């Protein structure tokens, strides 16, 4: 530790780790600590967080409702791109970290703090996401990452520190895994899930019922889009956060959105995570259906070729990078005509598209029909095929000649 810190803003949840970190920062750096908690839909009890932080030593406390900003400015932009990491992960945690970091840095500026701190460990992705965001916003900020500095490397050591310093810790029964929740998803990692052969226990899931226990009758819904963003469910216009929350409820009661993934962390190791993303799963399916009739083929294929790179940027923590921002502008340009209605069926873990329609539709029954039509001459296909086959024919003729 070679930093001199006067005032630090801590990303604080009130759990064991960040409660210990708050006191540890005061003792280790002899500094003033400002506690900051972001409400992004984690459904955690925030009522007594202010009191708890102050009792642990916080000089001041910020508890900010960022739910609408999270969905509007982070979730929806990623879903306009159909972003998905390694073909499975819908980036729930990855999208939340830059928003938390941004607000943390705003508070640091308001408070005149010279440092920020977080509770991410030295083995995961979150330390990278937080700190890349910090430095992108203020290159001169000091960062304190206790998990890379202290010797409190076990839960028992943290509990002992908390007991010694009179820090109240959660008295709820320990879960044999860690969780992270926001309006887009809930993730489960570690503990009993570290063996990728072990199935996740059914009583672990929070947002969704088992598909086996889902209703025997399917549920239909209509999702309305405007320029790539969902704006209404069954004709009712909703704010971004309210719309996603409603989709979570609808998907959850039908067992939609469960994923069990072994993913590649940015730091180099593989990690097993189990996710529930009911609303996001519905939204992605519907958005792709809306694009299927409103987006030009070559534009779609070009955009799709960039999605693995775009998702990787978000997963790795480069939300505030110039390359992500440039790519976002291109993606958003592709969404100008992605407007209309998608009808879906939710049933026992599956989300099925039943129909789609749009005033911007490029789908034309006159062109696509198998019946007689006057706009497409079938004999023209012969020249089209022969021209596309030319290089194949030449290749084979030269091979035969040799």
Image (spheres, grey):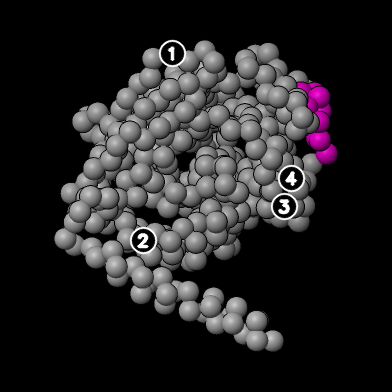
Q: Image quarter for residue 383?
A: bottom left
Is residue 270 in sight in this rendering?
A: yes
Find numbered disc 3 in the image and state the secondary structure of the residue it sits on: loop
Q: CA distance from mark 1 to mark 4?
A: 36 Å
Residue designated by label 4: 270
Is residue 46 in sight in this rendering?
A: no
Q: CA distance from mark 2 to mark 3?
A: 36 Å
Is 382 situated left or right of 304 in this image? left
Q: Looking at the picture, how far across and down is residue 285, in whole percent?
A: 41, 40
Find numbered disc 4 in the image and state the secondary structure of the residue it sits on: strand
Q: Looking at the picture, how far across and down is residue 70, in whole percent?
A: 42, 41
Residue 297 numbered mark, or none? 2
Highlighted magenta segment, given as a residue range = 151-162
Residue designated by label 1: 215
In front: label 2 or label 4: 2
Residue 87 numbered mark, or none? none
Note whether 256 is above or below 324 in the view shown.
above
Q: CA distance from mark 1 to mark 2?
A: 38 Å
The stretch drawn in magenta includes residue 190 = no
- What residue appears at the point 43 percent right and 22 percent down from the top-left corner? 347
């Amino acid at each position: 530790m070679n930093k001199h810190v006067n005032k630090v803003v801590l990303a604080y949840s009130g759990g064991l780790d960040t409660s210990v970190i708050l006191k540890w920062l005061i003792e280790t750096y002899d500094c003033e600590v400002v506690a900051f908690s972001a409400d992004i839909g984690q459904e955690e009890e925030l009522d007594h967080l202010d009191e708890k932080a102050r009792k642990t030593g916080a000089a001041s406390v910020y508890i900010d409702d960022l739910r609408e900003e999270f969905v509007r400015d982070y979730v929806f932009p990623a879903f306009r791109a159909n972003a998905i990491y390694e073909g499975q992960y819908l980036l729930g945690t990855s999208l939340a970290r830059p928003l938390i970091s941004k607000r943390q840095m705003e508070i640091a500026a308001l408070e005149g703090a010279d440092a920020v701190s977080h509770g991410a460990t030295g083995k995961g992705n979150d330390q990278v996401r937080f700190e890349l965001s910090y430095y992108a916003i203020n290159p001169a900020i000091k960062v304190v990452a206790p998990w890379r500095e202290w010797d409190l490397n076990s839960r028992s050591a943290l509990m002992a520190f908390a007991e010694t310093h009179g820090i109240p810790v959660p008295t709820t029964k320990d879960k044999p895994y860690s969780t992270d929740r926001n309006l887009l998803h809930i993730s489960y990692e570690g503990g009993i899930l570290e063996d990728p052969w072990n199935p996740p226990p059914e009583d672990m899931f929070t947002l969704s019922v088992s598909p086996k226990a889902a209703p025997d009758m399917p549920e239909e819904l209509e999702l309305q889009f405007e320029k790539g963003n969902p704006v209404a469910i069954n004709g009712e216009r909703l704010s971004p956060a309210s719309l996603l929350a409603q989709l979570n409820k609808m998907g959850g009661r039908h067992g939609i959105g469960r994923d069990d993934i072994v993913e590649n962390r940015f730091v180099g190791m593989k990690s097993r995570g189990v996710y529930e993303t009911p609303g996001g799963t519905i939204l992605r399916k519907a958005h792709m259906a809306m694009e299927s009739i409103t987006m030009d083929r070559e534009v779609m294929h070009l955009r799709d070729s960039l999605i693995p790179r775009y998702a990787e940027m978000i997963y790795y923590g480069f939300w505030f990078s110039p390359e992500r921002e440039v790519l976002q502008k291109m993606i958003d340009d592709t969404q100008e005509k992605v407007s209309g209605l998608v009808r879906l069926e939710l049933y026992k873990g599956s989300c099925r598209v039943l129909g789609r329609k749009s005033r911007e539709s490029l789908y034309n029954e006159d062109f696509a029909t198998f019946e007689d039509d006057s706009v497409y001459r079938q004999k023209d296909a012969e020249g089209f095929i022969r021209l596309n086959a030319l290089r194949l024919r030449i290749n084979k003729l030269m091979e035969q000649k040799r």
